[in-house]
Amino acid sequence: MTVDNKGEPNRIPRSLARAVALPRSSGLALDWDAFDWRGWLERNLAREVEQRRLFPWLAVCFGLGIILFFQAERPALWAPLGALAVLAAAAVWLRHNLLVLSVCVGLAAVFAGFSAGVNRTRSVAAPVLTRTVIAPVSGFIEAVEDREEGKRILLQLHSLQGVTEAERPLLVRVSIRSGDHLSAGQFIAGTARLLPPPQPAWPGGYDFARDAYYRGIGAVGSFTGAVRQLDPPTSPGWSLWLAARVDEARNTLTQRIAASIGGAAGGVGAALVTGKRGLISEPTNDVLRAAGIYHIVSISGLHMVLAAGTFFWLVRAFLALSLNLALRWPVKKIAAVVAMAGATTYCVFSGSDVATERSLVMTLVMFGAVLVDRPALSIRNLSIAAVIVLAREPEALLGPSFQMSFGAVAAMMTLVPLIQWRRAAGAPTMLIDKALSWGGRSAFGLVTTTLVASLATAPFAAYHFQSLNPYGLIGNALALPLVSLVVMPAAVLGVLAYPFGLDAPIWNVMGLAVEKVLDVSAWVGGFSGSTVVVPALGVGALVLLSAGLLVLTIPASHLRWLALIPAGAGLAFAATPHRYDIYVDRDGAGAAIRNVLGELTLVGRPSGFVVEQWLRADGDGRKADDASLKQAARCDGLGCVVEIREQRAVAFVHEFSAFEEDCRRAAIVITRLDAPSNCRAPVVLDRKALVERGATAIRLTPEAAEIQSVKRGREVQPWSAMAKASVPPAQERPRLARPVPEQDLPEDEISTGEPD
């Protein structure tokens, strides 16, 4: 009993007596006051500041600015630069307040990334072909790539008949069936069929047109006749001359390596050294993909680190042979300088692709840290490399190469040390014990790094390629030791011996290792379910999973546990994909329609590449030539009809005479013709609509049709509103349109969507 201020006892009201008499809690209830969320957050933020982990978030803010730029429509450069200047001044003025300083610097990084995107887009601006052209062309060959079916040429145009100079692309990519006499630096002329770079096959698919724009390629196509070598009307510039010399040297070495090794291993071995992948057959590519080790033929971080590491180790070991040099000279720093020079040479010689340049920047930053006596591998150095790469090529942020490589490296830096091999008490003394301990640590390290990298890159693989390789851990664990210990050291030694003509035995040794890698790939790829086709990951799921990866890898404190929130939400979205029900080709050549059984049915004549993209986006493992793709369609000479859910039908019209019936009965009409203006179908995608929209995908619900297109974005059309649309008079019917021709775009003239 308690007393009040006057000393009188406090009495409990009768109405509360029963409640007071209730027994106390059993002690299992949570004491929410014990969860000091604010204190926990403050302590962890203080640790982040102490560990200097705020700096890596600048790279994240820089990338966020680039993403915002790609959502903008023709932004001015002065706006983000002005905002950057204001925020930089505010950061200097308010630098004594850590919170305000951090916010100002982060926002400044956002506008810096936005400015980098604007500046890069303006600097590479060049004419892009807007229509199909068959005309005589002439120009300088900048690069030549050997392929199984011929050669593919990067041509710097000098003239294109029928196209004004203001509309003429600077670079075009053309293929030729037989061009053994062609080499980089030559001036050639011939008749070519050129087309605009193709846009995505479906909204959210691989955008070759965007990549081509940033590479300066304004058209793709093929030569239709003989190609003649002519005397150049002008002398090529020094940049073209240098690019031609490097490309010629690369092709010569590629042929040398392929001839020395022979077979499929020859093409793979040449690609590992020179970056020329044209000699690798498609079956070999499929084998490497199924085993999850296709990344070894794309010169990127693995190759750059192994090549630079070989230079570093050789130089350091050679200098350490002299006791005087080892004690008096900075041997480690000298080796780092040589490794940096060797890595730069390797990058130039391998073609300086986006992935290779990105890997070079990472390698230079790593060895630069060695020169200034800082840790070579750290999240801070990785963020510096990311900012440098994105400042040079902001568009790289949208590609799988940047996302997968930086994500894998960040995850390995953070997670591998947490699960590293723990030594037992007492070091082994016997030689056999030391060997077993070393072998165990090496195997454990290889498995853990491969597992962590595979998990970190899985969301990006699902988003860009719609495929996962469950046995990639086995393939990498068996193949990477051969690549690391034999293939890449042999590649470095072979290149060094090549000028002396003593390289053939080295290529033979390298070829034996590559053959074993292919054997391992074939074995792993033969497992049931080695390649799992998954539905395309949505943008929301990718953003959430990427945020989870960032929160997991950047913080040094317990804040990384917060990664469970976005990662869990991302996995939930990924587990329930929202598939499209209809895919329509960008020019109306064909469509894929989900029938009443829930499977896609193919109508029309789209290219095999486009069909493959549709199937992969839907998580359908069938091939483009599978006969079952056309079984559910009812077709005749006038067109096709596919029954869909809710007792509706989709009509694909070939001939104008089919419009009268199809416009009256079908819910959706798709055609390459000009549909009559009085067509009563709720949704009509004809020639004019597809010119405005580009490739289109439709998601159907009982209430509406959600239309997503490459050019116009998302539109929702309720069935009720569409059914009430007014019908124009019949006299406005257009004249008869031409029949549906074959697909305009050759399948061999568009990219396969693999990262460079």
Image (cartoon, rainbow, N blue to C red):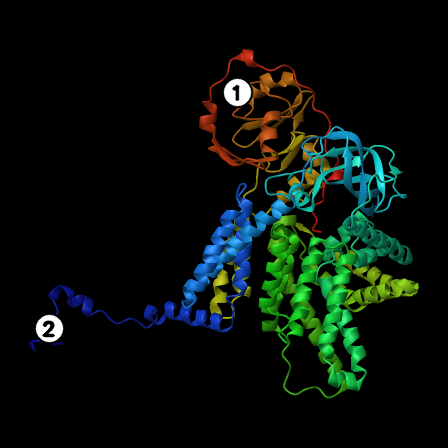
Q: CA distance from mark 1 to mark 2?
A: 83 Å
Q: Position of residue 390 (x, y in %)?
A: 61, 55
Number of callouts: 2
Q: Is residue 250 above or below residue 667?
A: below
Q: Position of residue 607 (x, y in %)?
A: 72, 35
Q: Position of residue 42 (x, y in %)?
A: 41, 70
- Nearer-the-camera pick, 556 or 165: 165
Task: Decide if residue 714 is on the left or right side of residue 268.
Answer: left
Is any atom of residue 475 visible in this view? yes
Q: Which numbered dot is residue 680?
A: 1
User: Identity of the amino acid at label 1?
Assistant: Arg
Q: Position of residue 37 (x, y in %)?
A: 38, 67
Residue that extends furthest to the right in the rendered view of this protein: 501
**Quarter-of-image position of residue 515:** bottom right
Is any atom of residue 571 visible in this view? no
The residue where tag 2 is placed is 10
Residue that extends furthest to the front in the rendered view of this protein: 234
Instruction: Tell me if mark 1 has few (under 14), some (14-19) or many (20+) residues whose alpha carbon lies within 10 angstroms of its own.
Output: many
Secondary structure at numbered mark 2: loop
Nearer the viewer's eye, disc 1 or disc 2? 1
**Quarter-of-image position of residue 674:** top right
Residue occupying the point 85% across, 44% down: 186
